[in-house]
Image: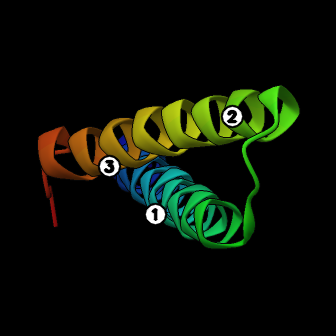
Amino acid sequence: MQHILKTNKMNLKRIFGALLTSLGIGGLIYTAILFVNSSNSNYAIKTLVVFGILGIVFFTAGINLIRTTKDEA
């Protein structure tokens, strides 16, 4: 029973890591779209910086969570 709970926790961590990675990729793609379509206003620059930083943080957190989760199957 304990092995099943441990395996489910590992799978949950991998799923959460994949979700964070997907959100990070989405944020980076959205930043790229905003960059291509932006003008030189301060609002556009702030938005680019915020979405870019959040995308990088989510992407690296998700990749590190997937990479460091041990596979105990």
Residue that mark 1 sits on: 18
Disc marking residue 45: 2
- Crowd around label 3: few <14 · some 14–19 · many ≥20 (10 Å): few
Q: Answer yes or no: do the residues labelled 3 and 2 have beta carbons within 8 Å?
A: no
| Image-based side of 40 in relation to 53, left or right | right
| Image-based side of 38 in relation to 62, left or right | right
Indicate the position of residue 14 as horizontal and vertical percent values. Answer: 39, 57
Question: Could you give the CA–CA distance between mark 3 and mark 1, rounded to whole angstroms?
Answer: 23 Å
The amino acid beneath tag 1 is Ala
- Mark 3 or mark 1: whose residue is earlier in sequence: 3
Quadrant where the C terminus lies? bottom left
The amino acid beneath tag 3 is His
For this rendering, which residue is in front, 24 or 46?
A: 46
- Mark nearest the camera among 1 and 2 is 2
Display colour scheme: rainbow
Residue 12's place in the image compared with 58, above or below, is: below
The structure residue drawn at horizontal position 61% and vertical position 67%, both measured from the top left corner, is 26
Q: Secondary structure at mark 1?
A: helix
Indicate the position of residue 20 as horizontal and vertical percent values. Answer: 53, 51
For this rendering, which residue is in front, 42 or 53?
A: 42
Residue that mark 3 sits on: 3
For this rendering, which residue is in front, 49 or 4?
A: 49
The structure residue drawn at horizontal position 76% and vertical position 36%, both measured from the top left corner, is 47
